[in-house]
Image (cartoon, rainbow, N blue to C red):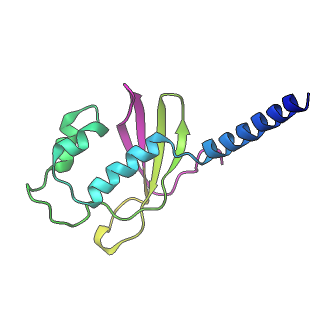
């Protein structure tokens, strides 16, 4: 009987630990946008680097255009930590709140990237510029 109680308590303890870890997990759509933004900050010019983020390879090619040589100049400003503004089992909206920067005058306050789960990967299907930061999901 004591052994069964011990097992039950260990099971509950493990479940609580796993629940806590799951709460801290980063949504894969956020990870995808963070990776995409880092490519832009690193001024990556290879279209193939962007293709996994879009259904249409023409968008990847457009992001890589400008010149064949990277300048080393970030193509997007720095940004605040990313967060979800909406989520379903197969879609997610990720907000990027841009930090003010002299090199990016006229840049929107925030951009919301709309992603869709397609064959196991989160791809950008649209983006919306906003004049203020949208509310995080659940607030």
- Above or below 71: residue 114: above
Q: Which residue is outermost to the right?
A: 1
Q: Main secondary structure of the magenta part?
A: strand
Q: Residue at x 53, y 28 (%)?
A: 89
Q: Residue at x 72, y 37 (%)?
A: 15
Q: Residue at x 47, y 62 (%)?
A: 80
Q: Residue at x 13, y 55 (%)?
A: 66
Return the residue nearer the eye: 79 or 52.
52
- Based on the picture, tell me whether residue 113 belongs to the magenta stretch: yes
- Above or below 77: residue 126: above
Which percent across, then down, holds residue 26? 52, 46
Q: Which residue is outermost to the top?
A: 119
Position of the N terminus, as image quadrant, is: top right
Which percent across, then down, holds residue 104? 31, 67
Q: Which residues are magenta?
A: 112-139
Q: Which residue is outermost to the left?
A: 68
- 3 left or right of 28 in image: right
The quarter holding residue 20 reads top right
- 61 left or right of 87 in image: left
Which percent across, then down, holds residue 9? 82, 37
Which percent across, then down, holds residue 96? 44, 54
- Above or below 128: residue 96: below
Q: How many marks?
A: 0
- 89 left or right of 29 in image: right
């Amino acid at each position: 009987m004591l052994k069964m109680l011990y097992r039950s308590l260990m099971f509950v303890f493990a479940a609580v630990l796993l629940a806590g870890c799951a709460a801290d997990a980063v949504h894969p759509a956020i990870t995808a946008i963070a990776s995409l933004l880092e490519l832009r900050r690193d001024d990556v010019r290879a279209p193939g680097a962007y293709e996994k983020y879009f259904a249409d390879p023409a968008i990847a090619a457009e992001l890589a255009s400008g010149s064949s040589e990277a300048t080393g100049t970030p193509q997007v400003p720095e940004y605040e930590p990313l967060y979800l503004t909406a989520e379903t089992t197969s879609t997610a909206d990720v907000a990027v709140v841009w930090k003010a920067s002299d090199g990016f005058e006229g840049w929107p306050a925030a951009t919301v990237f709309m992603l869709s789960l397609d064959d196991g990967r989160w791809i950008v299907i649209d983006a919306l510029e906003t004049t203020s930061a949208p509310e995080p999901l659940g607030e």
